Amino acid sequence: MTDERIIKPRSADGFKHIPGSPGLPLFGQTFQFISDPIKTTLDCYAKYGPVFRSNVFFLDMVNVVGPDAVQAVLADRDKLFSSKLAVDAFAKDFIGRAIIARDFSDHRFHRRIMQSAFKSEPMKTYLIRMTPHIAMGLNRCEKDNYFLFYPFIKKLSLRLASGIFLGLEEGDDLDAINGALVTMMNGVMAPIRLRIPGLAFHEGLVKRKFIADYISELIVDRRQNPSMDMLSEFCKAKSEDNEQFSDEDIVDHMLLMWLAAHETTTSLLCHVMYRICQFPEWQVRLREECYGIGKPAIDYEDVTKLEQMDWVIKETLRLHPPAPILMRTALRECEFYGFHIPANTMLSVGPGVSHFLEEFWAEPKKYDPLRFSPERAEDKSHPYAFAPFGGGAHTCIGMHFAAIEAKAILYQMLLNHSWQTPEGYDPKFKMTPIPKPKDDLPIKMTNLPRRSQFH
């Protein structure tokens, strides 16, 4: 059974004994958090320790930082902390009953059905579908001149997500959908949450309905005519007891995954490209690794062979986690790290903040993919030292798919092209809702001589 209680977040009066600061009147630390959630949280961690209180988006909350404390919340052995209630407080109108808005047995039931879409055979099909679209996208790039990488890779990742998740082909309203997704994301993060036309929150809800209606129409067709896409997998997936998802369940799950997949892939690849342009020796190393595969595009069996690319992706996720902060709500009162936590307390949990702690990482602000090599394995210092995809029961279900997609794109990008940012380039990033370059990342792509064995 699901817990349908409506729980109001606890007032700070219930945990004034916890160190911290409420910040500005009314707004608290909202503006600092929106500007840079990692730095804001690290500063408080240095001052107050692994547990402290704050106020963000008009909500008083307890913050949890450091691998041990984060593990205690996310592993949640005593079922004390709810993801559903936290999501409902921030984004219920947008997220609906997607997988992150479910808890315990209800979450487990839905996750088991969803897993069928992420088994090896469907994943092989997804990779096969990606390959020609990646090549076509690169062929459309302007060669030997600087162009804006962010809108390019966002459009490509949306194209891939739309094809793989929903079976949409080129020209299937992708521009309108992309615009709707952007507006919806802005609505999710809007600090003023009023349904007034013209405000970001209201406009985001309008676009959410547009996207949900679009997916609903596709479900009718996929139930009758299954295709080689994730939507079809969800439509036909069944539990051990032969139960299926309702149309509403599928809409909520697909909308979240479609949105999260292309937004996080876009953010990751922007950061990867910036870093391998900043450190061209890593671009050379990755290209040589791609040459070692000896194919124009990778197959499913090649994914694990790209070991150094894996290090680069992990180091990029360490420094630029797409979701450094996760939210939970205490279902009942408890003792946590010596502090009394009342029921209904909102918790801000920082797995991505742990990526910058000197206790677990050598020179944590330095870009150094070799820290993930078997010889150093700094990520093995603690199970939650490196947690870009969360942890516990709610670990991102699509993390392996994300790795495959990122490697498939990077492989083709590096095999036949070199990449360069302007000399002395130092980008600034907008940190929320998903990190992105403020200037859209100008980058130059130059063709390399094609090797005969790749034709």
Image (spheres, helix red, strand yellow):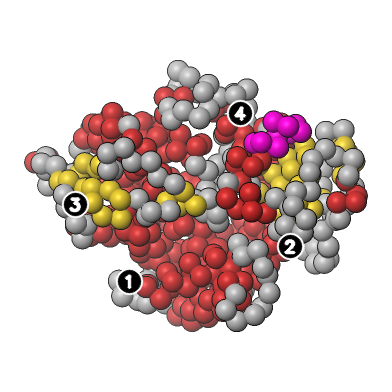
Marks 2 and 4 sit apart, C-alpha to C-alpha, by: 29 Å
Q: Looking at the picture, which amino acid does disc 4 mark?
A: Leu
Q: What residue type is labelled 1?
A: Glu
Tell me the distance, in whole angstroms, between the alpha carbons under discs 1 and 3.
Answer: 29 Å
**316 relative to 200, above or below:** above
Label 2 sits on a secondary structure element that is: helix
Q: Report the amino acid beneath label 2.
A: Ala
Q: Is residue 381 left or right of residue 442?
A: right
Disc 4 is placed on an element classified as: loop
Q: How crowded is the residue under tag 2: few (<14 C-alpha within 10 Å), some, or many (20+)?
A: some
Q: Earlier in the sequence, mark 2 or mark 4?
A: 2
Give the residue at mark 1. Answer: 169
Residue beneath the point at 68% across and 70% down: 193
Q: What x and y, as percent, mark residue 452? A: 9, 41
Q: Is residue 303 left or right of residue 261?
A: left
Image spot of residue 60 (x, y percent): 79, 53
**Label 3 Cα neighbours within 10 Å, binned few <14 / some 14-19 / many ≥20:** few
Q: Name the residue under label 3.
A: 145
> Could you say which quadrant of the image residue 84 lies in?
bottom right
Among the two numbered marks 3 and 4 on one chain, the one whose residue lies closer to the N terminus:
3
Would you say the magenta stretch is mainly helix, strand or loop?
helix
3 vs 2, front mark: 3
Check if mark 3's residue and mark 4's residue have beta carbons within 8 Å: no
Proximity of marks 2 and 1: CB atoms separated by less than 8 Å: no
Label 3: element kind: loop
* Residue most extreme to the front: 25
Please provide the residue range marked out in magenta: 42-50
Q: Which of marks 1 and 4 is in front?
A: 4
Along the line of sight, the residue nearer the viewer: 60 or 64 = 60
State the image quarter where residue 316 is shown: top left
